[in-house]
């Protein structure tokens, strides 16, 4: 009989070994064993209302901190096999309730799956996972995006749809917390995470093993009731509901009494923290406001390099073509200089604006700089956000000639002199204006 079917009719040695193996293996998956996770968790304590730490705990992807996820997985399998043999040797003569052990295994799986679904659902309901494209991204050629960034932007431009996806995930996760509705939550998540796995694989979005694991455990929870559902809905025959209830000892009852309110408080706190982060300082974009009045797209009308004026060119490596100032403290420059693309996913948690690189991750064609502006001395320092070009920086002064023209002048990291006269172009964007009403471009 399949391991994931209803309670075993007979617990032979093979079934016992399989149950013990999965029990150990799943614990190894769900308990963070890498010290880097805890170091990273402590760093997140400075995040807004603890959102960073709470989200990491709820959505911990096993082996994400290791060097080789497949090697770690093979090691977990080896440990689980060895542990199963030792468990059998040590406890062979002791009476064990394997039905109850199977029950607790399902409890562990459904609660862990529920927390992951709730956490990822919340960051879609409040569009944090796939935030709206930045202005710089709107001025980036389609071919300069890695596949995962295209998928994120395609979803992000429709926030209601992203919120709908999150609602499905969130509701399914909540259904897993109540034993009588587990089959419905698991059925929804089996299809949902199967699609997530396919998308992660096709668009190279990472977390493929983790999404496959979530889909696998959702299927495992669902097919526990699968035979009864098939008998009731397909063959339309009399079906007996699952009435198995383990007999809990005093310690088990105390454990359930303590854990249930903890889970409830955790979910409520995570929900509020996610909303607060979205409403105040979304973690993927810098939280520091940009230079006042600078937001927009600028053409580089005049550009001088080492006091030599360079005509507009799409091939000159030194010539700036256009510049974008974001609402936050990021400035991007379009040049012909080759770029080694940051292949990260920009989803790390940090309070440092310079390390919040979602806008520049997976993007070529533009150079993204975090900046600090001193409004008293009218100076601005630019530092490239791409880890492959982190030595690139500019020390500049700025001057507003009028409300749409700004002049930047100073030196780069090689002490070459830079002079750029930027003219704001008042463009209209269909994404902002809406595509179902007439506009004049």
Image: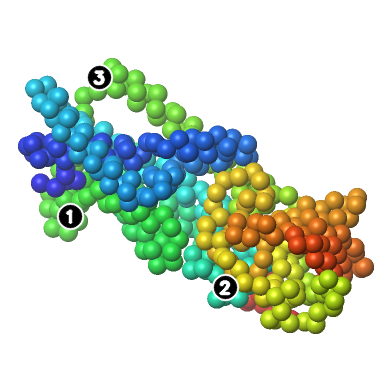
Q: What's the distance in space between the residues labelled 2 and 1, CA to CA?
A: 49 Å
Up the image or down, 288 lies above or below 151; here it is above
Mark positioned earlier in the residue sequence (2 or 1): 2
**Dot in front, 2 or 1:** 2
Residue farthest to the top?
250
Residue 249's tag is 3
Q: Residue at x 67, y 76 (%)?
A: 336
Nearer to us in this view, 97 or 210: 210
Q: Is residue 357 left or right of residue 223?
A: right
- What secondary structure is marked by label 3? loop
- Residue 26 x %, y %: 29, 40
Q: List x then y, in percent, for residue 333.
A: 71, 68
Q: Nearer the viewer, residue 294 or 253?
A: 294
Write down the residue under mark 1.
230
Q: Secondary structure at mark 1?
A: helix
Of marks 3 and 2, which one's residue comes earlier in the chain?
2
In the image, residue 39 above or below residue 204: above
Query: Label 2, on which residue?
Result: 144
Residue 111 as seen in the image, left or right of residue 372? left
Q: CA distance from mark 3 to mark 2?
A: 61 Å
Crowd class of label 3 (few under 14; some 14 to 19; many from 20; radius 10 Å): few
Q: Residue at x 23, y 38 (%)?
A: 80
């Amino acid at each position: 009989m399949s391991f994931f079917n209803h309670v075993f009719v007979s617990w032979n040695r093979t079934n016992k070994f399989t149950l013990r193996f999965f029990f150990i293996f799943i614990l190894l998956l769900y308990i963070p064993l890498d010290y880097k996770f805890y170091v990273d968790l402590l760093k997140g304590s400075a995040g807004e209302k603890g959102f960073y730490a709470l989200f990491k705990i709820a959505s911990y992807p096993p082996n994400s901190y290791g060097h080789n996820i497949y090697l770690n997985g093979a090691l977990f399998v080896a440990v689980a096999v060895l542990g199963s043999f030792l468990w059998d040797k040590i406890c062979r003569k002791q009476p064990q309730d394997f039905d109850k052990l199977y029950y607790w295994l399902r409890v562990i799986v459904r609660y862990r799956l529920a927390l992951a679904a709730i956490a990822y659902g919340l960051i879609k309901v409040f569009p944090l996972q796939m935030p709206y494209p930045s202005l710089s991204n709107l001025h980036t050629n389609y071919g300069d995006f890695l596949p995962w960034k295209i998928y994120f932007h395609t979803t992000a431009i429709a926030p209601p749809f992203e919120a709908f996806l999150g609602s499905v995930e969130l509701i399914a996760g909540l259904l897993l917390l109540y034993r009588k509705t587990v089959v419905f939550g698991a059925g929804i998540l089996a299809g949902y995470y199967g699609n997530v796995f396919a998308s992660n694989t096709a668009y190279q979005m990472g977390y493929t093993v983790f999404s496959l694991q979530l889909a696998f455990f959702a299927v495992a929870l669902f097919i526990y009731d699968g035979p009864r559902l098939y008998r009731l809905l397909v063959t339309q025959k009399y079906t007996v509901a699952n009435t198995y209830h383990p007999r809990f000892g005093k310690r088990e009852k105390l454990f359930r009494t303590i854990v249930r309110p903890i889970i409830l408080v955790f979910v409520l706190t995570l929900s509020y923290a996610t909303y607060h982060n979205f409403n105040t300082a979304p973690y993927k974009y810098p939280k520091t406001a940009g230079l006042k009045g600078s937001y927009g797209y600028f053409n580089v009308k005049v550009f001088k390099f080492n006091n030599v004026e360079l005509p507009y060119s799409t091939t000159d490596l030194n010539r700036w073509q256009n510049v974008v100032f974001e609402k936050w403290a990021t400035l991007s420059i379009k040049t012909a200089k080759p770029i080694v693309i940051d292949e990260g996913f920009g989803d790390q948690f940090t309070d440092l604006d310079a390390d919040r690189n979602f806008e520049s991750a997976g993007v070529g064609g533009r150079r993204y700089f975090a900046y600090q502006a001193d409004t008293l001395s009218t100076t601005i320092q630019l530092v490239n956000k791409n880890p492959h070009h982190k030595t690139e920086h500019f020390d500049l002064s700025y001057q507003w000639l009028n409300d749409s023209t700004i002049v930047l002048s100073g030196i780069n990291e090689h002490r070459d002199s830079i002079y750029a006269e930027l003219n704001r172009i008042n463009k209209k964007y269909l994404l902002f204006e809406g595509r179902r009403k007439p506009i004049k471009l």
